[in-house]
Image (tube, helix red, strand yellow):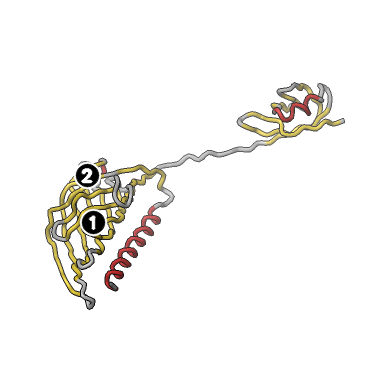
Amino acid sequence: MKRTLLLASAALVALVATSFAVAKGLDGNTRSARAVAGTFTAATASKVETRTCTTSDGKTLVSTKGLYTGAATGDADLTGNATLRASSLINTTDNIGVVSGTLRIDVASGRDTQAQFDAVFSGGQIAGLATGHAHDPAAKLVANLSAGFTGSGGFTNGKIGGGTAGGAAVELGPGRCQSTKTVNEHSEAKGIISAVSSSSITVAGLTCAVPANLQSKVAGLAVNGHAEIKCSLINAVNTLTRVEAKH
């Protein structure tokens, strides 16, 4: 039991460390995100090394290192020959462990898509997180990854995003965001009223639209009278915000 807890803790540490790496990758140059998805199988195993030991509490641990090849299909960045180099440490008594390694997809044109992954193994299935870059090296890849796995048989029914046990996958690309800037402009005037109506007023050459809540105050003013007005630019219209008669 202690060994099982140790394996689970190792898996958690690996995933937390990966999460920090993802956060660090989301820098100020990231300005776009789009969903991507793919499936893969890499069941041709080669250069597999296996070691087995028994713990003091009677658990059997199996560690493997191997090269697994196959094919991936899906979005353009996730389509091509797939190569995974993976290491696993599995408690075969309790059927739990961890699998980690690298994934490369030979995209038809441009640079290959590459990622590192860390996953928890349970009951013949893995689920974890893969991070790397798409065939465009400026595009980051952050993907939930799941598959069936055995050390001798490799990966089957693999998913990159698109409904994995952990969720989706996103591709983060460079770009530029254009922010919206709000400009507040204020103006005021004090002097002779040269024009006035229920919809506008002009004082000392400054003309402002009259909103409904100030129409009653403006109604008491007349041309050639004196007033002080304050206005603000609201929805591109110079609008009266305060008016006071002067004598």
**Relative image position of residue 56 (x, y in whole percent):** 22, 78
The residue at the point 23 percent across, 66 percent down is: 94
Name the residue that disc number 2 marks.
Answer: 107
Task: State left or right for residue 178 relative to residue 243.
Answer: left
Name the residue that disc number 1 marks.
Answer: 125
In the rendered image, which quarter contains the N terminus?
bottom left
2 vs 1, front mark = 1
- The 10 Å Cα crowd at callout 1, few under 14, some 14 to 19, many 20 or more, is many
**Relative image position of residue 65 (x, y in whole percent):** 18, 63
**Relative image position of residue 223 (x, y in whole percent):** 81, 21
| Tag 1 secondary structure | strand
Regarding residue 188, the answer to whether it shows in the image is: no
CA gap, disc 2 to disc 1? 26 Å
Q: Quadrant of residue 176?
A: top left
Task: State left or right for residue 212 relative to residue 77.
Answer: right
Q: Residue 167 — which label? A: none
- The 10 Å Cα crowd at callout 2, few under 14, some 14 to 19, many 20 or more, is some
Regarding residue 207, the answer to whether it shows in the image is: yes
The residue at the point 12 percent across, 58 percent down is: 46
Q: Quadrant of residue 127?
A: bottom left
Query: Up-down: is 129 above or below 226?
Result: below
In the rendered image, which quarter contains the C terminus?
top right
Q: Quadrant of residue 233?
A: top right
**Relative image position of residue 188 (x, y in whole percent):** 74, 34
Amino acid type of disc 2?
Answer: Val
Mark 1 or mark 2, which is nearer the start of the sequence?
Answer: 2
Task: State left or right for residue 83 relative to residue 26.
Answer: left
Amino acid type of disc 1?
Answer: Gln
| Tag 2 secondary structure | loop
The residue at the point 34 percent across, 59 percent down is: 18
